[in-house]
Amino acid sequence: MGEHGNGGPNTGAVIKAGDGKSSGYAIDNPGLPPHRPRLADADEKAAKRAERQVSALFLISIIGTVMFFVGYFVVGVTAGDLEMLRLQNTLLGVGVAFAMLGIGLGVVQWARALMPDHEVVEDRKPLRKEEDRAEAAQTVNEIVDETQIKRRPLLRNTLIGAALLAPLPAVVVFRDLDTSEDFGPERMRHTLWEEGVRLVRDPTGTPIRASDLTVGSAVHVVPETLREVSGHGDRLAAKAKSVVLLIRMNPDDFEPVTPGREDWKYEGIIACSKVCTHVGCPVALYERHTHHLLCPCHQSTFDAAEEFKVIFGPAGRPLPQLPITVDDEGFLIARSDFTEPVGPTYWERG
């Protein structure tokens, strides 16, 4: 049974690699299936019909974007008016769906009915710089020609219109996430810190004396005036901007400071914003021996010994430093607010 199951040596039931005419393969390469031309390949009327179908789908995308803007800007919703609210939500949802679906289906139909569908096998060639550039340029030109976008202006123009309009709803929606009057970079320029405000532990609110900190300490602190902010949401927003990391180092470990910042620290105690200048994650990982602060999100690394400058990662600027000193009772206080906006650097900041 063993020989029968394995196709014994004399049965001829097993073809070994390299035997017969298989050219080293157990099964001969069947090759590519014969190409079957589509109706649009042979009939220009069918090709025109497919072009109009694709353009119609792109037009549906444009109409969907317009529906979104009508629902967003034209339909007015007042408190308690559920009918208008339903109408607005319907226009917003259907509009975005048509905008995305129209482009997606249009591109699929374009590739299915008009772009060449023959299979091509090309052997890998040795790399030659100048020849490769010319060949790559030729390949790009061939791709453009195969899309037929040059000789079918209706398809091209509707695609351009749909592609330009489709992202606009997302821009409007993201901008509308914040409707406050002070939207913009100036709001991040000012926090609760000001001259004389004590640094307190979070969440206990306990003031901190300089003598409470030992070399190597890293403490999460907030301004004492945070408790005076009414409203849970406003308090969280104020805290998110004002949160500070307080570190005590050996005074001999500091690098030369920027002129004007000589009195920003106190006996080796230095403070900085915890909000990463990349995308706003909390910077809280402190390495005592190197004095490095690490953002856990994207590994931006800041050097506390050099005024929190960026030494690694995608952050574009140092962590803002909070000027500090002590009051008559020995408690740590702020000298002023941050002298630059806290949080990530973004295009509106200038």
Image (cartoon, helix red, strand yellow):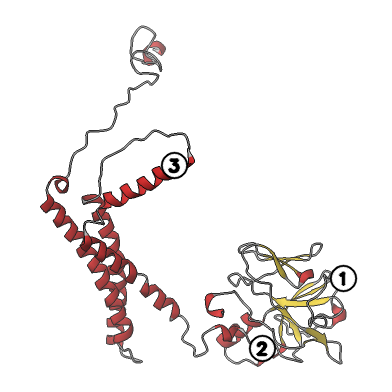
User: Is 167 on the left-hand or right-hand side of 61?
Assistant: right
Q: Residue at x 44, y 42 (%)?
A: 132
SS label for mark 1: loop
As measured in the structure, the alpha-carbon distance from the residue carrying label 1 to the one carrying label 3 is 59 Å
From the image, tell me which residue sits under label 2. 192
Please name whichever residue, 100 or 41, is drawn nearer the observer in this view of the structure.
Answer: 41
Horizontal side of 283 relative to 18 (left or right) equals: right
Q: What crowding class fits label 2: few (fewer than 14 Cα within 10 Å), some (14-19), or many (20 or more)? A: some
**As drawn, is 303 to the left or to the right of 119?**
right
Q: Amino acid at mark 2?
A: Leu
Please state, as top left, top right, bottom left or bottom right, where the C terminus lies in the image.
Answer: bottom right
The quadrant of the rendering that contains the N terminus is top left
Q: Which residue is mark 3?
A: 132
Q: Which residue is mark 1?
A: 250
For residue 214, the mark is none
Q: Closest to the observer: 83 or 311?
A: 311
Measure how far apart labels 2 and 1 are at the Cα level.
29 Å
Q: Is residue 232 visible?
A: no
| Residue 242 percent across, percent down from the top left | 66, 82
Q: Could you tell me if the residues under marks 2 and 1 are in contact, i.e. CB atoms within 8 Å?
A: no
Residue 288's place in the image compared with 118, above or below, is: below
Residue occupying the far front of the picture? 130
Please determine whether, in this image, residue 144 is positioned above or below residue 130. below
Q: Secondary structure at mark 2?
A: loop
Q: Earlier in the sequence, mark 2 or mark 3?
A: 3
* Amino acid of disc 1: Asn
Q: Nearer the viewer, mark 2 or mark 3?
A: 3
Of residue 146 and residue 130, the one placed in the foreground of this image is: 130
Residue drawn at (88%, 70%) of the image:
252
Question: Compared to 277, does 241 lie above or below?
Answer: below
> Are there few (<14), some (14-19), or many (20+) residues within 10 Å of tag 3?
few
